[in-house]
Image (spheres, rainbow, N blue to C red):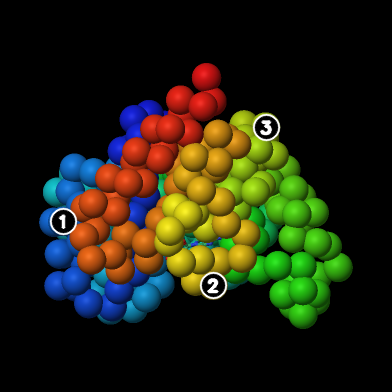
């Protein structure tokens, strides 16, 4: 796995519907970021073509498609993602979806299981029809993802320690420096705490892509990752 330096551990979300804005963000942050993440908003607006261009130019690309469908469709989508040249692809951590994704995984593509969205708390889960608390469901899904052969897991920073013990590579969104707005994220932590707890990489969206100076913001996050790594030893 390629998460080593503080920079390599920073995944920046290109959460925009505007290709020109994504190009500006990549240009502004190049050399300070390890991985660029293309999610649903951008995918619906030409982002997958941009993702292929980024991959062709040598950037590590994370396709955050959060796949969940019948096994045949998930497997076919995973094979198609191989053609984009992405390094990471997310699927919701439902056993059926993970099994299908792992069985179709092309070389060089890591399957990333998403446990429970970091915007969900216990009450949101109850509303969805789950009896489990967020932390109980996350724990269950971490164990399932590990036993079904997923490569990485996405979970909240507060669950990074448990995920780390599973042996999966741990990726955490919901990360904020103290001065940055939480937005809709409900289970947040600083980069230092997330890394110290066992996160291998962090995903940061709005605090970098909506910053007046995205490069300066990315550098603040990599410095915080470095502090977290130092505190681990
Ligand atoms: O702007 P912010 O830093 O909150 O963005 C976090 C990014 O991580 C978004 O692209 C969001 O879709 C993604 N994400 C998340 N929670 C998950 C999985 C992915 O926030 N469980």
Residue at the front extreme of this rendering: 179
Q: Is residue 231 above or below residue 106?
A: above
Left or right, 229 with reference to 130: left
Can you tell which mark lies on residue 165? Answer: 3
Looking at the picture, how far across and down is residue 132, in whole percent? 83, 62
Distance CA(mark 3)–CA(mark 1): 36 Å
**Element type at marker 2?**
loop
Distance CA(mark 3)–CA(mark 2): 28 Å
Q: Residue at x 54, y 43 (%)?
A: 194
Q: Which residue is mark 1?
A: 28
Mark 2: C-beta under 8 Å from nearest atom of ligand 1? yes
Which-is-in-front pick, marks 3 and 1?
1
Q: In the image, 219: left or right of 112?
A: left
Instruction: Identify which residue is drawn at 52% across, 19% down.
Output: 233
Q: Which mark is residue 184?
A: 2
**Relative depth, front residue between 95 and 122:** 122
Q: Is residue 67 above or below residue 149?
A: below
Q: Answer few, some or many: residues within 10 Å of disc 3's Cα (few below 14, many 20 plus, some between 14 and 19).
A: few
> How far apart are labels 1 and 2 at the CA level?
25 Å
**Of the residues under marks 1 and 2, which one precedes in the sequence?**
1
Q: Residue furthest right?
A: 131
Which element carries disc 3, helix, strand or loop? helix
Please identify the quarter of the rendering in which residue 78 is found. bottom left
């Amino acid at each position: 796995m390629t998460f080593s330096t503080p920079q390599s551990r920073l995944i920046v979300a290109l959460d925009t519907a505007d290709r020109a804005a994504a190009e500006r963000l990549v240009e502004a942050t190049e050399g300070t970021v390890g991985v660029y993440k293309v999610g649903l908003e951008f995918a619906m607006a030409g982002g997958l073509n941009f993702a292929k261009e980024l991959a062709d130019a040598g950037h590590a690309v994370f396709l955050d498609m959060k796949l969940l469908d019948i096994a045949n469709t998930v497997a076919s989508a995973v094979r198609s993602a191989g053609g984009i040249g992405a390094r990471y692809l997310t699927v919701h951590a439902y056993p059926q979806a993970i099994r299908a994704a792992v069985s179709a995984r092309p070389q060089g593509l890591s399957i990333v299981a998403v446990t429970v969205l970091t915007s969900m708390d216990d009450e949101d889960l109850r509303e969805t029809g789950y009896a489990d608390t967020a932390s109980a469901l996350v724990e269950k899904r971490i164990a399932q993802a590990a036993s079904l052969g997923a490569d990485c897991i996405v979970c909240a920073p507060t669950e990074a320690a448990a995920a780390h013990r599973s042996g999966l590579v741990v990726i955490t969104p919901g990360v904020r420096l103290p001065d940055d707005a939480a937005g809709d994220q409900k289970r947040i932590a600083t980069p230092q705490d997330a890394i110290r707890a066992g996160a291998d990489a962090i995903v940061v969206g709005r605090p970098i892509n909506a910053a007046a100076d995205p490069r300066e913001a990315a550098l603040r996050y990599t410095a915080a990752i470095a502090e977290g790594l130092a505190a681990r030893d």
